[in-house]
Amino acid sequence: MSTVIENQRHLFRIPDDITYLNCAYMSPQLNSVEAAGIEGLRRKSAPWEITTEDFFTDSERARELFARLIGARANDIAFIPSASYGIATAARNIHVGAGEKIVVLAEQFPSNYYTWQKLAEQCGAHLHTVPVPADGDWTAALLETLNDGVAVVAIPQVHWADGSLVNLEAVGERCRRIAAALVLDLTQSAGALPFDVSAVEPDFAVAACYKWLLGPYSLGFMYAHPRHHDGSPLEENWIARANSRDLAALSDYDARYQSGARRFDVGERSNLVMMPMIIRALEQIDGWGVENISATLARLSRYLAERAVEAGLAVSAAGHNAPHLTGLRLPRQDPRAVLEALNAAGVYISLRGDCVRVSPHLYNDKDDIDRLIAVLRRQRPQV
Ligand SMILES: Cc1ncc(COP(=O)(O)O)c(C=O)c1O
């Protein structure tokens, strides 16, 4: 049973006159995350206090926390600097044959597109783009496409432009049946929407930290299924090798890697600033509970949808959209004028495609939604 969480704006530093409904762009920082970052920044001023163990302790804690969030084990988690790095790692470790298909969704985020486009070119494979479904149901559209001859399905849990959802359990089940690899970009969902690797069984899943994980920019996580733990990393750094705890003996080169997915870690992953920040953020998310975050944001998004419809706006993919990310369509308006009017009123959202993308978090309440709708109404005096 999930519980609705009361407003958490006091944990952030958001001025009273700002209505920030743009977590899908970048989350604001929790005060505690900011404090952890500042403390981390100061640590390098005294390097004599930094021990070898410090290169491992925080990263293991962060791995553990992210693993718990998605029902995995710490051993399955690697650090990546961006979603695109994780996708490139996945592509390097999946075999695609000539004539086979790589399946993506129309207009999905470029970090989960270009790598596949290039791989398809290199392998003589075919990149198949599932068109935007008229009824918003990506799952049905995907299942129709997923038949023999598909080598990879590379998709998000939530479409970044309008919040339309994919039922990953159904897609995962189909991928297993047709022996296709499943690669997921969870950047727009991890931390805000429940996800369980054991129910979906992806090959790889990546998430950048700076949105719904409430963490710093330039850090992300990658889950790698144990069947890929003997895979090939993008780079060969010292800390991913089995002997890396012994700094004095690093040049006794070791062919073995650290266990599990650690071999995929990006170089210099033990960042003194970012590790404490993401630990604090994940502890807070764990404290709230993703189910509860999701239920709370769903309530707010339902309120948004009601107010939007009253104001004559269409909700994109209605009935198939995520609890934390809503696309409102502005058919006959200049979207840039709408954005300017919103910003002038201190209301922040994103324009993606032909949608106003609204993505609240626990620092938002119904007043924020009312403020947004009031400006959108003013922009459309005819409704
Ligand atoms: C779905 C999705 N994936 C990934 C990213 C970020 O990608 P990267 O970490 O490669 O910059 C974004 C940013 O908006 C996104 O919306």
Image (spheres, rainbow, N blue to C red):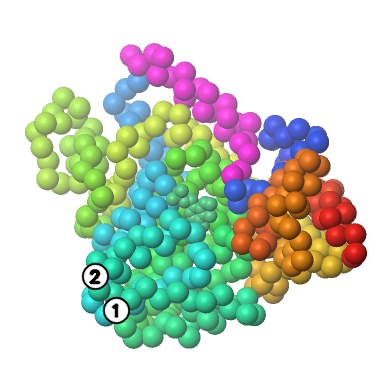
Dominant secondary structure of the residues highlighted in magenta in the image: helix
Position of 197 compared to 244: left or right? right
Q: Secondary structure at mark 1?
A: loop
Give the residue type that dot 2 points to.
Cys
Q: Position of residue 127 (x, y in %)?
A: 37, 73
User: Is residue 229 located in the magenta-colored stretch of the structure?
Assistant: no
Q: Position of residue 326 (x, y in %)?
A: 69, 61
User: Is residue 44 located in the magenta-colored stretch of the structure?
Assistant: yes
The magenta region covers 26-49
Tell me the tag on residue 123.
Answer: 2
Give the residue type that dot 1 points to.
Glu
- Label 1: how many Cα within 10 Å (few below 14, some 14–19, many 20+): some
Q: Secondary structure at mark 2?
A: helix
Can I make out residue 187 in this image? no
Q: Is residue 266 above or below residue 305?
A: above
Q: Position of residue 174 (x, y in %)?
A: 42, 81
The residue identified by callout 1 is 100
